[in-house]
Amino acid sequence: PPFRDCNASPSTHLTLPTAAGGRQAKAMEASQRPPMKCQYIIDTIHRAVQNYGDCLVRQSGYVYQFIIRDAGPEGQITLDLKHGRGEIRSGIDPNADVTITIMDEDLVKMALGNLSYSNATEKGRLEFEGDQLGGYVLSDVLQLINKREANGGQSYTTASDETTTRWRVGTVVVFFLIVVYLLVVERPKAVMTGGGPLELERVAHMPQGKLAKLSNGVVSKLQMFSGQAFRQLVGGRISADFRPRPSDVYIVGAVGAGTTWVSQVLHGLRSNGSMDFGDITEVVPWIEVSGSKAGKAMMARQEDFSPRLFKSHKLPSSLPQGGRYVVLTRDPMKVMLAQYHLYGNGTWGQMAGLQPGEMPVGLWATGIFAHTSANEVWRNVAAWYECCWHDQKAIWLTYEDLLEDPVWQIRRLAKFLLPNLPGPDVLKKVEKQASRKFMLEHVSQFDNHFLLERLDIFREAAKKAGAPLSMPRVLPEAPYLEVPYTLDELFSARWERLVQPVVGFDSYEAMRRGIQGRAAPVYGAVGSSAPRTWGVLRFMGMLLLVGALALAALSVGPRSWRSAGVRL
C-alpha cells in the first residue's frame, strides 16, 4: 500500500508552500529536527491533490488543519479539500472546518490502520475540534487515495469511467422498469380491479356470459327482461316535440336516490298541496319517456302547473339544456339496497320471472350495481358535479338531510322552486304529505301504474307472473338485510376511483358535509362554472418526477452519491 513506508525516514520529500518570508526560517529550524515519520503520508496526499484534487474535493468538502505536536512549525499543515481543485500547504488556517491535533507516531499508526479514530479520541491521543463528521469523511478520502496510489501512483480513471457508466446505465434501466411497471402493470390492474376486494372485483369484472351462469342464471333473466322493458319504456329518445323552457325544473339522481319522494315535495309546493292525481308520474313525468307510447299521456297535465317538473336518472349531457336542476344524492350503499328491494327482490324481479329471495344481495351488488358496465350511482354523482356544482341554476340535496330535517329542506326547495315562499299552512301540508306514513297510506299514487299499464311488455309479464301491474316506489321499512362487509370496501374503492378525482371529497359523508355548506341558490339565479379534474395532472406530475430523477442520476457519478449519503 502507498502508506506501507510511513515508518521509513525518507531522505527527500516534497516541500509544501508556506507563508511569504517564513520558508527559510522554518527550513533552518526543521533541519535541526529528525524528519517526521509521517512525511511519506503528507507527500502521498500532496501528489494526490495535484493529480486528482477535484475528485477529492467532491468526496470531502472540508478544510482540515493538522497540528503534529512533536514536529514543531513543520507539523502545522492545512489540507484544503473544499475549494477549487484542493491544496495542501504549511501553516495555520483560522477558517479550517476541522482541527486535528496528534502525535507524529500516532498519525502513522492511524494511517497503517493500527489505531482507529474513535480509540485515539477516547484515549486522549487525538484532539478534535470542529465538525465531527469531517473525521469520518477524512477516512474515506484516505481510503480513496490509498486505492488510487496502490497501482504505483497511476490513476484508475478508465476503470472508474467504466464503473460510472455501468452505474448510470443500471440506474436508467431501473427507472425505466419502474415506469413500465406503473404504466403496464399497476395502472391497468387498478383500472381492471377497481381497487376493491379481489373476490368481489372478479364478479364485478366478469363478462356477461360467465355472469349468466351464476345462481342459476338469475342475472341473465333479470337483465334480459330489463333490456326489453327499458327499450319499450324509454323509447330511446326524448320526444322531438318537447320544447324546454328556462323555468323547467329537472329532479335528477340515481335510481333509488329518492326522486319520487322529492317529486311529491315539489309538486305539493307548486300546487299548494294538491293530491289530485292518480299516479305521481301524471304530474311529474320522466323526461326520458316523453318519446315512448306513454309519453303523450304523461306530458298532458304539465301545462296545468308552473313551473313544469320532470324527473330523470340520466346524465346532464342527455338532458335538454337551459333549465334548472334539483340534484339528489344518497349514500351508495343505501341506493344499492333500495334498487335491490325495487328491482332485484321486488315486483320488477317477479315480472322478470324471479322468485322472492332468488337474487342474492351480494350478487346484485357486484354483478349488476357495481359491475364495470354499470357503476351508475358513482358516475351520476361525478357527472352532475362537473356540470352543476358551481351552477346557481342547481340546488343540491341529500336524501339523508331531507330525512333528518324535512322542515328546513322543504323551505330550501320552496325558495329555489318558486318566486315567493308559500305560506306556513302550505309548508306544513307539504311536509305532512311527504312523510312515509302519508305516502304509504296513498301508495297507489306512487306505484307507476299510470305508466306500466300503457306498455305491453309489463301487462304480459305481470299476467304471466301473477304480479300486480304496479311498482310501489314507497316501501315500508325493510327488515334488516345482512350484506357482505367487504361491500363497504368495494364501494369505497369505487368512490375513490370514479368520484374523488372529480369532486375532491374522499367519501360520500365528506361530500354530504360539502353540500350542507354550499350556499342555497335563489330563484332565477344564473351562472355556471366547473372545476377541472386533476387526476390526469397528478399522474403526469409523477411521471415528470421520475424523469427528473433519471436525469439527475445520469449527471452524477456514484462517488458523489456516496458522498451525499455520508453527509446526510
Image (cartoon, helix red, strand yellow):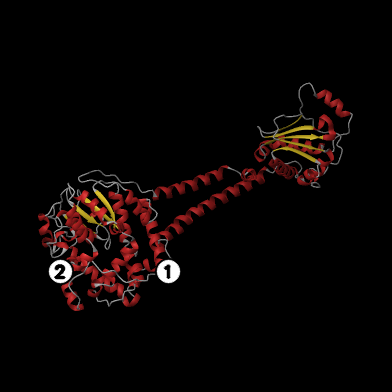
Q: Nearer the viewer, residue 188 or 350?
A: 350
Residue 242 position within the rendered picture, expressed as x and y whole percent measured from the top left: 13, 54
Q: Nearer the viewer, residue 489 or 68?
A: 489
Q: Please say if the residues under marks 2 and 1 sit with CB atoms less than 8 Å apart.
A: no
Residue 373 position within the rendered picture, expressed as x and y whole percent measured from the top left: 32, 63
Residue flagged by tag 1: what amino acid is it? Glu
Compared with residue 505, is residue 440 higher up or lower down, i.e. above or below?
below
**Looking at the rendered structure, which numbered label has been put on residue 141?**
none
Please identify the residue farthest to the front as the structure is shown.
Answer: 425
Q: Is residue 77 left or right of residue 414?
A: right
Kindly state the secondary structure of the residue where label 2 is placed.
loop
Q: Mark 2 to mark 1: distance in Å?
A: 40 Å
Kindly state the secondary structure of the residue where label 1 is placed.
helix
Mark 1 is surrounded, within 10 Å at the Cα level, by few (under 14), some (14 to 19) or many (20 or more) other residues, namely: few
Residue flagged by tag 2: what amino acid is it? Leu
Q: Is residue 393 left or right of residue 185?
A: left
Q: Which residue is mark 1?
A: 199
Q: Which residue is mark 2?
A: 455
